[in-house]
Amino acid sequence: MKMKKRILSALMAAVMCCGTFTGCGKKEDKTITIYSSAEDYRNENARKMLNEKFPEYKINLVDIDTGALAAKLAAEGTSGDMDIIMELETTYLEKCKDSLATLDDVDFSVFEDSLVPEEKKYTPWVLMSGCVIINEKMLEEKGVAIPKSYDDLLKPEYKGLISMPNPKSSGTGFIFLLNMVNERGEDKAFEYFDKLAENMSGQGFTTSGSGPVKALLQREAAIGFGITYQAAYEIDKGSDFTISWFKEGAPYTTYSSAVIAGKEKDEDVMKVFNYIVSDVSPKDKELYNPEKIYKNQKSEMKSFPESVPYGNMDGIRDVAKKDALLDKWTH
């Protein structure tokens, strides 16, 4: 009888164990913490997909600006609360690659070959081009001509009508700076932006890459140095914007995803990360940004231009060059 009671007690303990674990192997409601610099609506779509796919986990997807996320990664390395970085400008990830896991188990063959990093410390998340977004109707109301060049924007009639992200806090801002440096040389490029600062709307250069689009939506600016897919997204929703490029072409960069070093040993974290690569990222491209990172990629965005005239972005992965240019930026 005592033996039967012991067996029964052991069985009950095993059942209780399984009740507090998913599949008697994984903790129920385990938190997976993801940081992303993507726009809130794109993060919300990712959050929805992840919660539906992984009800056994608590998906903590944190919205954060590019500059703040880069600073957090640089300061904390592997000691912080991050498990996964879903979107961060690739140069910042390259700068902090010692804090990132090598992704040996990730299928890189699905990506465009030119975007696959040699050390496989991160996966492509988005190819992002910039453009000059213009509200032509607003300019017409103010009796101001549609600009045909960057130099046009230095004219006094554009004062208070232009919005651009700050390169120190925004990857979008930096690609416009680097493109201008490559086209005109460093001294003339900085001279240009010093003059352009006098025509900025609102409080000056925005902290976020999304700032110019928001300024245009609120009619705080009529011209924005912004992100092409954001402009197309708003045009699809009915905004009266025009996507333009000047002779220098479209500045561009990539944003990537990564796992914090040491977290690749956690099979729950890797299960979530691989789902981001296989499903969340392709859906993000389908809905929000047609610029191609996958070999097989679909898009529902109607207003995205058929082709993008990519400009000169030499040095986009040169961490030392980026640091030097940002140290020189004074706005």
Image (cartoon, rainbow, N blue to C red):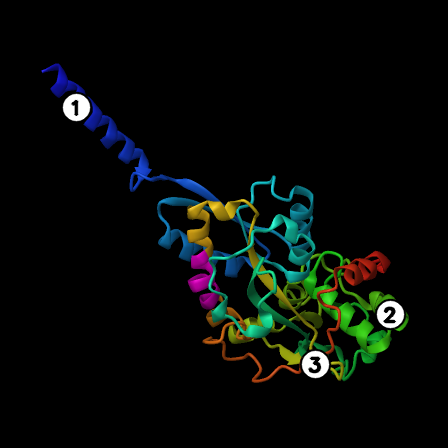
* Three-letter amino acid code at the position of disc 3: Trp
Front-most of residues 304 and 28? 28
- CB within 8 Å, label 1 to label 2: no
- CB within 8 Å, label 3 to label 2: no
Q: Name the residue located 87 percent from the left edge and 70 percent from the top edge.
A: 186
* Three-letter amino acid code at the position of disc 1: Ile
**Residue 275 lies in quadrant:** bottom left
In the rendered structure, which segment of residues is drawn in magenta?
Answer: 274-283
Work out whether mark 1 precedes mark 2 in sequence or the reverse, and give the earlier one: 1
From the image, which quarter does the N terminus lie in?
Answer: top left
Front-most of residues 271 and 241? 271
Q: How much space separates mark 1 and mark 2, taking CA atoms?
A: 78 Å
Q: Quick check: is 277 in the magenta stretch?
A: yes
Q: Which mark is residue 245?
A: 3
Label 1: which secondary element: helix
Front-most of residues 146 and 219? 146
Front-most of residues 136 and 142? 136
Q: Tell me if residue 158 can be seen.
A: no
The residue carrying mark 2 is 186
Label 3: which secondary element: loop
Identity of the residue furthest to the top in this view: 2
For the image, the number of numbered tags is: 3
Identity of the residue furthest to the left in this view: 1
Is 131 left or right of 200, judged from the image as shown? left
Work out whether mark 3 precedes mark 2 in sequence or the reverse, and give the earlier one: 2
The residue carrying mark 1 is 7
Label 2: which secondary element: helix
The vertical placement of 24 against 286, above or below, is above
- Residue 150 is situated, as x and y percent measured from the top left of the image, at 79, 78
Q: Quick check: is 47 in the magenta stretch?
A: no
